[in-house]
Image: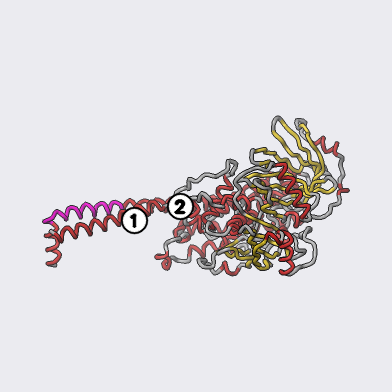
Amino acid sequence: MNKVQDWIHRLKKGHMLSVIGVFLIIIIALGIILYQKEVQAKQVSENTYNMAFYELVDYVENVETYLAKSLISTTAEQGAETLTNVWREANMAQTYLSRLPIESQELENTQKFLNQVSDYSYSLSRKNIYNEDLSEEDLKNLKDLHNYSIDLENTLNQLSEDLNSGRIKWGELTKKGNTAFAQQVSTESQEGFSSLEENFHEYSGLIYDGAFSEHITNQEKKGLTGEEIDEEKAQEKVQEFIGKDQIKEISKLGLSENATIPAYGFTIQTNQDETINISISKTGGHIVYMNHDREVNSEIISQEEANNKGKEYLTQKGFPNMKETYYLKQEGIMTINYAYNQDNVVMYPDLIKVKIALDNGEILGIETTGYLNNHTQRDITTVQITKEEAKKTLNKELNIQSEGLAYIPTEWKSEILCYEFKGKVDDKEFLVYINAENGREEDILVIKDTPNGVLTM
Amino acid sequence: MKRNIKKISTVIVIIAIFTISIITIEKNTPKIATTYAKTSNSTSDVQLMARAINGEARGEPYEGQVAVGAVILNRVKDSKFPNTIAGVIYQSGAFTAVSDGQINHPIAENSTVYKAARDAINGWDPTGGCIYYFNPATATSKWIWSRPLVKTIGKHRFCK
């Protein structure tokens, strides 16, 4: 005690007490400011999470209502409208679901359910627009989806109560960077949300004409032909592809059995000490991709020269009859899309991309998955309507510049034989695709001619 | 008097350390990176993806950078994830670089992340269709080990 008094006394002597006092006040003030900032930041994220959650509940309720309506709708117009509403509401629900502070894998199936409801109802609404009746199976699917949406709605309402009563706290779900307090966190909040996922334990997904259909991942790879090869054989293929004289060192990365296209990977050191990555398919020893990154500092090669170099390269590597479609130029490297051409019909699904360095025309990369997934000889005799008939469907303003037949890919990995009309309206260029079997207008693309490439949107 | 001077200097040093640490904390709070794209036609998607790759894999080999971009795009196409690039990147808890602000780390002048982002958007997928990856040295989730492995690139294990 004496010591302290003595200390204070001595401080007083040197006016130190006031100095320390001032510093203390500064420290406390800074502490308060920091604390307030922290509280503010917490409040902001709390508000964002609450908003996302309540939006989610609303949108899921709407999904449920519109699905119920779609089940009893009898006219195509009403059906199309109701299903379009399901599509929109489910899409919004999915957006807000992904904003909740929950690890993505814990809500995987809920996410998948909402995505499929949205996509599936879009695909059905198109059926309605074309005056096709919904099949027995479609109706059964809608009914199942409706039941799932009721379960989801109920769980969400339960969670909403838990949130209101404070049993679930967003702060407990976002415990990031707060390891000191991690042990005190109750698991209640976490468990609350896993009940959402439990609704979908038996949900097996849907197969339909849409981007999120279940069958897409398991589709047959038509261009992946040939016998299975081993790693030695794959290495020979690599040496042949790159050129033995270019290779200083080649290292095997092994087989990726679980890849969409099972393939052997290799890394190559070239004589110039650059790295090339290359992947050779197990079935048939096809090249899946090759990629070589290097600085390109000048642009000497013209677009046309690059087109031809790419085409030459493809022919030499066993891909004849490829026609350039679009290109993009970035940092001295041109990426050109080539599509297979069969009897003057463009096969857009059989897509190969080639990267060309514009300083010396060297091929820096190739990517063939589109080709390997889809390439096959097509039967073009399915054309039912003439070009003249197809033209009648076109907008009268369209000033046609070129026309032809083409296969175009759909979002659900099938393909449609179409007449392709390229034309101008005012100064805008368009591609219009008319189904060659039934005359439907399947797609319209806008061509954007930018200084760095031609793009379609 | 000498003793007092000692004390004064200790107090000043302590306060200086404290102020400096507060300033560094303030400085370290993520700010939007102000690096601009090298080419004029860079869409916002390429930029966002490049920043994500920069945050997640700037020390990785080129193929590993393209692979991270490919995973983002594979997620966009997968029904179990959001349907836009921004939706996938900013999904809660999906990428550590987003949670800890590394996504806003400035992109170095000679960095390859823009090229990697474009290669991924143009369709190069070194992962063969993966939707997850993790660094075995820092991964905390046991669940991630249960996913079927496709391949290892650099420090990351890519799986389905």
Give the residue type at disc 2: Ser
Report the magenta residues as a range: A12-30
The structure residue drawn at horizontal position 84% and vertical position 52%, both measured from the top left corner, is A378
What color scheme is it?
secondary structure
Residue A259 counted in the magenta span? no
Q: Are marks 2 and 1 in contact (CB under 8 Å)?
A: no
Per the image, the residue denoted by label 1 is B21
The structure residue drawn at horizontal position 75% and vertical position 57%, both measured from the top left corner, is A372
How far across and how far down the image is residue A15, in percent? Answer: 14, 53
Location of residue A387 (image quadrant): top right
Q: Secondary structure at mark 1?
A: helix
In this rendering, would A105 be left or right of A440?
Answer: left
Per the image, the residue denoted by label 2 is A45
What secondary structure predominates along the stretch shown in magenta? helix
Q: CA distance from mark 2 to mark 1?
A: 25 Å
User: Which chain is mark 1 on?
Assistant: B
